[in-house]
């Protein structure tokens, strides 16, 4: 698969999911465990969140609905306090779980001059510290509206999930002249099918069972990033 953009003004993007792609775990589960440890969430709310995550993994729940619910529960809370809590947690518990293959693939795309972007359902307060640590300039993730330093209980635009990922990727394309038909997307989740079908080059990383079957049917490359992956030679070909 060679990148050969017909428009000399366009750029190539490399979009990375976070959970089980850049990092080896589901960050939502990890965050819930941390909240329970600090006594900041009830057992009932933690259990409800785990049920939502399980249904999401099986594509049995509308995550846009879940994101709207979560945003509503944030209403009135201080953004700075939440942001500081998330950054400290990410630096302590999440960054050590960045997998070797992710670091390698990010650096290979950087060397090619591609626009690097995180494209994740997780809120920006989780994804931004990861992007900062890895030198990724663009972050597209679920965003909560803030007014006068407090959460309003609403989202900014659609949640970054399913078709929402395509929405935010196309927004980046317009801002940075990124040609999605020549760009790359890395993910583990079947729920990302809209984005996988939107880009010209897709690579499936440690996929869930449904995505693994789809990748096999369509001949998409599958990689295990728990170990270093192959290089991107000059011209932009990725070897699985």
Image: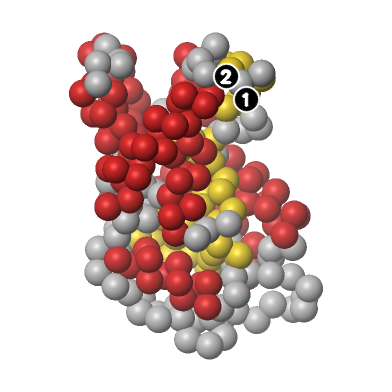
The local secondary structure at tag 1 comes to: strand
Which residue matches tag 1? 145
Marks 2 and 1: CB-CB under 8 Å?
Answer: yes
Please tell me which residue is depicted at 35% across the width and 60% down the height of the picture: 205
The local secondary structure at tag 2 comes to: strand
- The answer to whether any part of residue 133 appears in the image is yes
- Where residue 174 sits, quadrant-wise, is bottom right
The quarter in which the C terminus is drawn is: bottom left
Residue 151: mark: 2
In the image, taking residue 133 as reference, residue 7 lies left or right, namely: right
Q: Position of residue 64 (x, y in %)?
A: 52, 28
How many marks the image carries: the answer is 2
Q: Position of residue 177 (x, y in %)?
A: 74, 63
Q: Position of residue 194 (x, y in %)?
A: 54, 49
Q: Indicate whether 145 appears above or below 56.
A: above
Q: Position of residue 29 (x, y in %)?
A: 28, 33
Work out whether mark 2 precedes mark 1 in sequence or the reverse, and give the earlier one.
1
Q: Indicate whether 31 appears above or below 170.
A: above
- The answer to whether any part of residue 65 appears in the image is no
| Label 2, label 1: how far apart the Cα atoms are | 6 Å
Neighbour tally class for label 1: few under 14, some 14-19, many 20 plus, Cα within 10 Å: some
Q: Indicate whether 6 appears above or below 194.
A: below
In the image, taking residue 14 as reference, residue 87 lies left or right, namely: left
């Amino acid at each position: 698969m060679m990148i050969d953009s017909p428009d000399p003004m366009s750029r190539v993007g490399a979009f990375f999911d976070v959970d089980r792609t850049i990092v080896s775990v589901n960050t939502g589960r990890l965050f819930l465990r941390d909240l329970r440890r600090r006594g900041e969430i009830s057992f009932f709310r933690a259990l409800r969140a785990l049920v939502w995550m399980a249904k999401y993994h099986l594509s049995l729940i509308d995550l846009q609905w879940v994101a709207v619910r979560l945003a509503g529960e944030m209403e009135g809370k201080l953004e700075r306090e939440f942001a500081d809590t998330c950054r400290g947690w990410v630096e302590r518990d999440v960054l050590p779980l960045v997998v070797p293959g992710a670091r390698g693939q990010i650096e290979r795309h950087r060397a090619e001059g591609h626009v690097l972007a995180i494209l994740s359902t997780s809120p920006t307060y989780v994804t931004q510290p990861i992007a900062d640590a890895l030198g990724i300039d663009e972050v597209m993730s679920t965003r909560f509206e803030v007014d006068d330093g407090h959460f309003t209980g609403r989202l900014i635009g659609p949640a970054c999930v399913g078709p929402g990922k395509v929405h935010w990727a196309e927004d980046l394309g317009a801002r940075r002249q990124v040609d999605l038909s020549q760009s790359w997307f890395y993910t583990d989740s079947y729920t990302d099918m809209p984005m996988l079908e939107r880009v010209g080059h897709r690579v499936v990383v440690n996929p869930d069972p449904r995505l693994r079957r789809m990748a096999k049917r369509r001949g998409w490359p599958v990689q295990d990033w728990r170990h270093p992956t192959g290089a991107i030679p000059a011209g932009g070909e990725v070897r699985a």
